[in-house]
Image (cartoon, grey):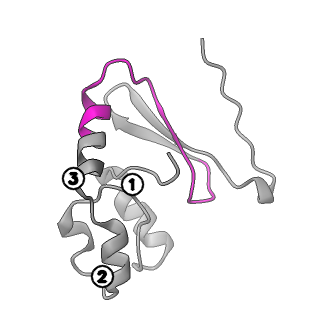
Amino acid sequence: LHTPLYTAEVFGEFLAMTNGVCAYLCGCPEECYAHFSSAERIRQQRADAPTKAMIDLIRSSPQIKGIFTGHKHIFHRHEFAPGVPQILGGASYAGDAVQYEIY
């Protein structure tokens, strides 16, 4: 995935990075973006039906062992769901790289 998926754990942290402008997460509940002043930011954050279905599928599929995302240009690892880490890759232009070994 390109844009990280919403979790309550990272929403506040990512929102603070932009001084409250936008968290840049996919699948945010409406109460998370209702205070945004920009209609464009609200549109970007709103989860449509296919997005909600994808998130439900990821949360309920035992075959999914992790989510790899980017977009934020920082390295960050957190639990998306129990046993399912969401790992954001850093920015290659800043010299960041992440190597994954999957067994």
Q: Residues within 10 Å of mark 1 (few under 14, many from 20)?
A: some
Whether residue 47 sits left or right of residue 41 in the image: it is left
Name the secondary structure under disc 1. Answer: helix
Q: Position of residue 97 (x, y in %)?
A: 74, 43
| Looking at the image, residue 44 lies above or below residue 28 | below
Residue at the (30%, 82%) spot, across then down: 36
Which residue position holds label 1? 10
Count of all numbered marks drawn on residues in the image = 3
Q: Type of residue at label 3?
A: Ala
Q: Earlier in the sequence, mark 3 or mark 2?
A: 2
Classify 20 as above or below 12: below
**What's under tag 2, amino acid-wise?**
Phe
Residue 24, image x, y percentages: 44, 65
Q: Residue at x 50, y 45 (%)?
A: 1
Q: Which residue is mark 3?
A: 49
Q: Main secondary structure of the magenta part?
A: loop
